[in-house]
Image (tube, rainbow, N blue to C red):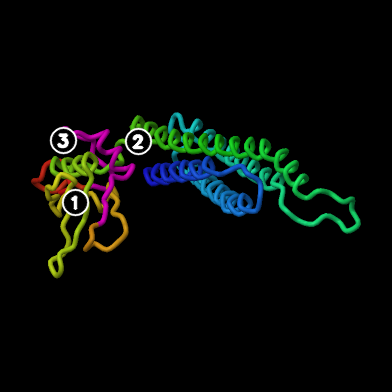
Amino acid sequence: MPVQIDHLRQLGADFAALHATVTTLDARPGSELLQQLGPKILSVHELIGRTLVRLSVLDGSQYVAVPGSRSSLETLGEVVASASVAASQLARAVADNPLEAAVFAGGPPVDDATTRRARHSEAEPLLAESLTTAAHHLDLCATCCQYTASGIARDLKDDPEHRRSWPRLSDAQYAALDRIAQVGARRYERRGKGTYVLAGDGKTIHAKPFGVLEEHRLIRTGTGATFGGQDIEVTAAGKLVLDIQKPGRAQPTSPGIVPAPGKGGGRLR
């Protein structure tokens, strides 16, 4: 489920980015507008497909048994509807965009310049309205995706069954996770000496607690060459663990983690 939260947050960010590009479109009619509208329409449909995947995954998961889950599914359904309206409005702009081409042979003679100005003058307010409506619905989609991600995180945090499923962290592991959440971190590679991790404040994050965080997918490392440094961020699962657990506080035993003899409580080390 935390992976789904990450997917939804990225989906919301992508809707927001598309909204930003649509708001910059110039409503002046012509071939240039057509060339810009095509990729935007394809992008909206790609986001609709991703939203449907997220909705289907949630609908087929154990999340549906968690109190409050219905609201999340309904909100994602509205994202599909709103994104479809945005795509429709952009398509409407394609249809209303007057392009220059020849009339039928034998038609009445017209003043091309005058006719062009009249057609453009008639189309501009229609194009502006379609672009504004499309942008509004894309903005709504972005908001709803982030709202749904936050709602799922809240539902999981409040649900006792899911609270027991998170890995238990030692104080050192919790501190490392909290530091990454607060100031960020990057992983670097020393030639022939392996990798090391530096927090945003310049302090080293030791390999053992970092390895545990990585093993349980509480953090995510970006792509790229380690020589130049890879960004590390806390995942949705990591943020939930930070919210639920506190260092030095007894936590309920997590399924699948067997207490080590003499180590007290089976903490991950």
Crowding near the residue tagged with mark 3, few <14, some 14–19, many ≥20 C-alpha atoms within 10 Å:
some
The kind of residue tagged 3 is Pro
How far across and down, in percent of the image, does residue 120 sit? 70, 43
How far across and down, in percent of the image, does residue 260 sit? 14, 48
Q: Which residue is farthest left?
A: 262
Crowding near the residue tagged with mark 2, few <14, some 14–19, many ≥20 C-alpha atoms within 10 Å:
few
Q: Which residues are magenta?
A: 230-257
Residue wearing tag 3: 247
Find residue 92 and report its image quarter: top right
Residue wearing tag 2: 161
In this rendering, position of residue 116 left or right of residue 162: right
Looking at the picture, tell me which residue is in the foreground, 75 or 89: 89
Calculate the distance from the C-alpha at mark 3 to the C-alpha at mark 1: 16 Å
Numbered disc total: 3
- Which disc is residue 74 wearing? none
Give the residue at x 73% y 53%: 100
Calculate the distance from the C-alpha at mark 3 to the C-alpha at mark 2: 21 Å
Closer to the chain start, of discs 3 and 1, is 1
